[in-house]
């Protein structure tokens, strides 16, 4: 049996399999290059600006991946509400969703795509411009 590293810990587990759903055209294993992570020009993004989606992007920008249940717990929202927000981010190509089966239990791991990270950083830059304009 081939062991596959768990996204959260990097450890291997023989009872672990994964599948991914994303509209991103880049493979997850490609990593983020300096070009992908450079702060782009400031652009306000209404999709990311919704409070829940902004918080999701903020969390995911700080980690390689976070489990669905952890995000739900931190945001204190229902599964259906979180699923709705994540679907919008996934459809936009901003978030990758990976289904992991470990020890017979299915888990959903989420991570920002390079496009998602760039859009999030661009949105933050736009918000900073708005704030700085008031000074």
Image: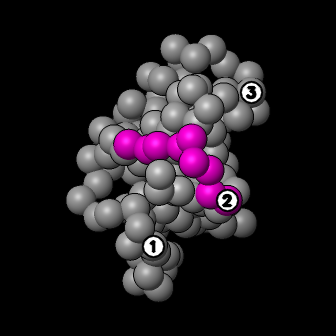
For the residue labelled by badge 1, is the local secondary structure a helix, a strand or a loop? loop
Q: Which mark is residue 11?
A: 2
- Mark 1 crowd level (few <14, some 14–19, many ≥20, 10 Å Cα): few
Which numbered disc, 3 or 1, marks the residue that appears first in the sequence? 1
Residue lying at 48% horizontally and 80% vertically, measured from the top left: 38
Tell me how far mark 3 sits from mark 1, CA to CA.
Answer: 27 Å
The foreground one among 85 and 24 is 24
Task: Residue 68: name its quadrant.
Answer: top right
Total numbered labels placed on residues in the image = 3
Residue lying at 41% horizontally and 67% vertically, measured from the top left: 29
Left or right of 35: which side holds 112? Answer: right
Residue lying at 74% horizontally and 22% vertically, measured from the top left: 76
Which numbered disc, 2 or 1, marks the residue that appears first in the sequence? 2
- Mark 3 crowd level (few <14, some 14–19, many ≥20, 10 Å Cα): few
* Residue for badge 3: 73
Front label number (3 vs 2): 2
Magenta stretch, residue numbers: 11-19
- Mark 2 crowd level (few <14, some 14–19, many ≥20, 10 Å Cα): few
Q: Quadrant of the C terminus?
A: bottom right
Front label number (3 vs 1): 1
- Judge whether 33 appears above or below 88 on screen: below
Tell me how far mark 3 sits from mark 2, CA to CA.
Answer: 24 Å
Residue lying at 40% horizontally and 62% vertically, measured from the top left: 28
Check if residue 17 falls in the magenta segment. Answer: yes
* Residue for badge 1: 31
Which numbered disc, 3 or 2, marks the residue that appears first in the sequence? 2
Q: Residue furthest front?
A: 1
Coloring scheme used: one colour
Rendering coords of residue 122 (x, y %): 47, 64
């Amino acid at each position: 049996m081939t062991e596959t590293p768990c996204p959260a810990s990097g450890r291997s587990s023989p009872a672990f399999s994964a599948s991914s759903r994303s509209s991103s055209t880049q493979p997850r294993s490609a990593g983020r290059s300096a070009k992908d992570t450079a702060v782009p020009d400031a652009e306000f993004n209404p999709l990311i600006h919704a409070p829940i989606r902004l918080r999701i992007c903020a969390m995911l920008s700080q980690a390689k991946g976070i489990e669905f249940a952890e995000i739900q717990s931190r945001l204190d929202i229902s599964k259906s509400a979180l699923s709705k927000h994540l679907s919008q981010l996934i459809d936009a190509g901003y978030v990758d969703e990976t289904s992991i089966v470990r020890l017979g239990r299915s888990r959903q791991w989420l991570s920002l795509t390079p496009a998602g990270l760039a859009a999030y950083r661009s949105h933050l830059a736009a918000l900073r411009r708005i704030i700085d304009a008031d000074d």
